[in-house]
């Protein structure tokens, strides 16, 4: 158990809908990262928050947004869902701000299925 | 675009054999190269990592070999066991979020 929690574990929804994925980082971790994992694209970085502030953006669609709250939990909002958004969404957390100085601990993921 | 190319896509190894997974990167600024292990239904977990100031790092049965001039690094799993069956991802970074390879599905058969 990495100490990172994600809810829900599974989510099934229809095209055009909006969903919210939630992540609670490990106790004491200030950084939260979101990744999308699909069979053909592997693990793709979406966005990074550090202590409530956005620090880096990756291949995140404009239909997607995220935020990190004062208690450090984070939410990833996906709107106007398309079939191609079906994937595993992982949250990871780390103590510091730098990706190369500390370990990222991954949560168990949320499997999103868009029908 | 920053990329990390990983091969092979899948690998079948006999129990007790050596599993070798290779990765190549483009960005010479990368300075941290971790390997992650992922079991079905779980998130990736850090297995071992290396920085480019050393050519090899060993932790138990797992070894990373690093070739800075060739911009390549590889994971060697010695005495592979059925419990090692998982998907392995290499990654690279420098003060940025991790850039992952596409993964290698390893199956260790008895």
Image (cartoon, helix red, strand yellow):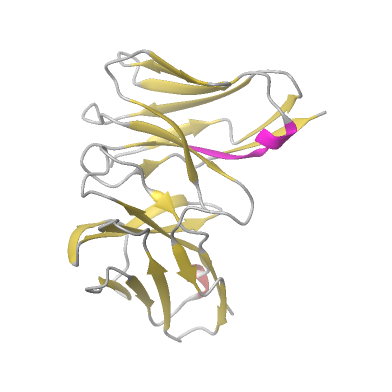
- Is residue B44 rendered to the left or right of residue A44? right
x then y, percent, for residue B51: 30, 24
What residue is drawn where x is 19% and y is 62%? A51
Q: Quadrant of the N terminus of chain B?
A: top left
What residue is drawn where x is 34% and y is 59%? A27
Q: Is residue A68 above or below residue B99?
A: below
Q: Is residue A100 above or below residue B53?
A: below
Q: How many marks?
A: 0
x then y, percent, for residue A21: 42, 74
For residue B23, which quarter of the picture?
top left
- Is residue A34 rendered to the left or right of residue A6? left
Q: Is residue B1 above or below residue A93?
A: above
- Is residue B93 rendered to the left or right of residue A85? left
x then y, percent, for residue A109: 51, 62
Q: Residue pushed farthest front?
A: A27
- Is residue A45 rendered to the left or right of residue A82? left
Q: Quadrant of the C terminus of chain B?
A: top right
x then y, percent, for residue B48: 45, 30
Please state the extent of the stretch shown in magenta in the rendering. B82-89
* Residue A47 inside the magenta-drawn segment: no
Q: Nearer the viewer, residue A103 or A27?
A: A27
* Residue B87 inside the magenta-drawn segment: yes
What residue is drawn where x is 37% and y is 58%? A26
Q: Is residue A24 above or below residue B74?
A: below
Q: Residue pushed farthest right?
A: B110
């Amino acid at each position: 158990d990495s100490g990172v929690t994600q809810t829900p574990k599974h989510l099934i929804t229809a095209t055009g809908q909006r969903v919210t994925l939630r992540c609670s980082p490990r106790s004491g971790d200030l950084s939260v990262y979101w990744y999308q994992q699909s069979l053909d694209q592997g693990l793709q970085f979406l966005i990074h928050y550090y202590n409530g502030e956005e620090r880096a953006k990756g291949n995140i669609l404009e239909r997607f947004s995220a935020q990190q709250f004062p208690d450090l939990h984070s939410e990833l909002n996906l709107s106007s869902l398309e079939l191609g958004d079906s994937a595993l969404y992982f949250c990871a957390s780390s103590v510091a701000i730098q990706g190369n100085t500390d370990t990222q601990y991954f949560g168990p993921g949320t499997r999103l299925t868009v029908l | 675009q920053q990329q990390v190319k990983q091969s092979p896509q899948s690998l079948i190894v006999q129990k007790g054999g050596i599993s070798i997974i290779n990765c190549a990167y483009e960005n010479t600024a990368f300075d941290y190269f971790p390997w992650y292990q992922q079991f079905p239904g779980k998130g990736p977990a850090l297995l071992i990592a290396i920085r480019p100031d050393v050519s090899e790092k060993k932790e138990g049965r797992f070894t990373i070999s690093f070739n800075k001039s060739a911009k390549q690094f590889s994971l060697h799993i010695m005495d592979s066991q059925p419990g090692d069956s998982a998907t392995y991802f290499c990654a690279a970074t420098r003060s940025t979020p991790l850039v992952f390879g596409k993964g290698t599905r390893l199956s260790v058969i008895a």
